[in-house]
Amino acid sequence: LRLTRGGCRCTGMLEAKRENQWRPICWESVSVGDLEWICQQLECGPPTSEPLELIIPGGREPQSQARRCSSPPQCQWELENCTEHVIVACREPVKTTPKPPPAPPTSTPEPTGPPRLRLVDGNFSCSGFLELHKQGLWGAVAGIPHSWTHLVTLICQELRCGTAGSSHGEPEPGIHLPVRWEAVDSCGSRSLLDCFNRSSSRGKRPAFITCSG
């Protein structure tokens, strides 16, 4: 089915295609009850009025023989001599604006997991800037006082990098994570990874540790 000569896709003379030929539909073969189905087939909105009648002036035969629906809505189109063709007016389909895709996350969240330490950007695998993952957040650890050698030794043992370590000879900091953690000297009997608290990065340099390996 299609609508022609109406100036828009959903209004005009109703035609049906059969045997590769488009032919107009006789007015008498379309009832008000058929309009809803016709508009749906045309992917238009609901009908706006009753089927309108187009009369060929002077009773002349149309240029192409019209068709008649013998059993709507599953029509068996039959050729028919008629001078009254049907015009159908459907509403234009409602345009729906697709939902915008969700905004990508500004950063990739770090997978949660147990607290853990690591050394990065050092001369070998057992030296580098000390970073801690805790509470779902990676961050650099603030510089550790040189006198806290026992704490540095515990860190090296935790990283399986020997039993001795040093925080001396810190290089100029390069690109590293912001300082988010600082060591606490009096840890008591707590786990090593409990010896770090949240810290402000203002005025603090990251700790650089070298273990014996």
Image: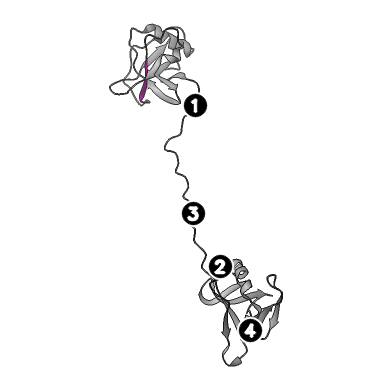
Tell me the CA gap for discs 2 and 1: 54 Å
Q: CA distance from mark 4 to mark 1?
A: 74 Å
Q: Nearer the viewer, mark 4 or mark 3?
A: 3
Give coordinates of residue 16: x percent, y percent. 64, 75
How far apart marks 4 and 3 lie (CA) works out to: 42 Å
Work out how far the residue at label 3 is from the one at label 2, CA to CA, in angstroms: 22 Å
Is 182 one of the magenta-colored residues? yes
> Mark 3 belongs to which amino acid?
Pro
Q: Quadrant of the N terminus?
A: bottom right
Among numbered discs 4 and 3, the one appearing first in the sequence: 4
Secondary structure state at the residue bearing disc 2: loop
Which residue in the protein does label 2 denote?
A: 46
Which amino acid, by three-letter code, is at mark 2? Pro
Label 2 crowd (10 A; few <14 / some 14-19 / many >=20): some
Between the residue at mark 1 and the residue at mark 3, the CA separation in whole angstroms equals 35 Å
The answer to whether any part of residue 122 appears in the image is no
Image: 188 above or below 78: above
Circles 2, 1 touching at the beta carbon (< 8 Å): no
Question: Is 54 in the magenta?
Answer: no
Q: Residue at x 67, y 80 (%)?
A: 67
Residue linked to disc 4: 64
Percent coordinates x, y for residue 123 in the rendering? 41, 18
Closer to the camera in the image, 16 or 84: 84
- Secondary structure at badge 3 equals loop
Residue 112, label in figure: 1
Q: Is residue 168 above or below residue 20?
A: above
Please identify, in this view, whether the residue under mark 3 or under mark 2 is nearer the observer. Answer: 2
Q: Which mark is residue 98?
A: 3
Q: What range is drawn magenta here?
A: 178-185
Q: Which residue shows up at 57% across the image and 65% down it?
A: 43
Observer-side mark, 2 or 4, equals: 2
Relative height, residue 54 to residue 115 (above, below): below
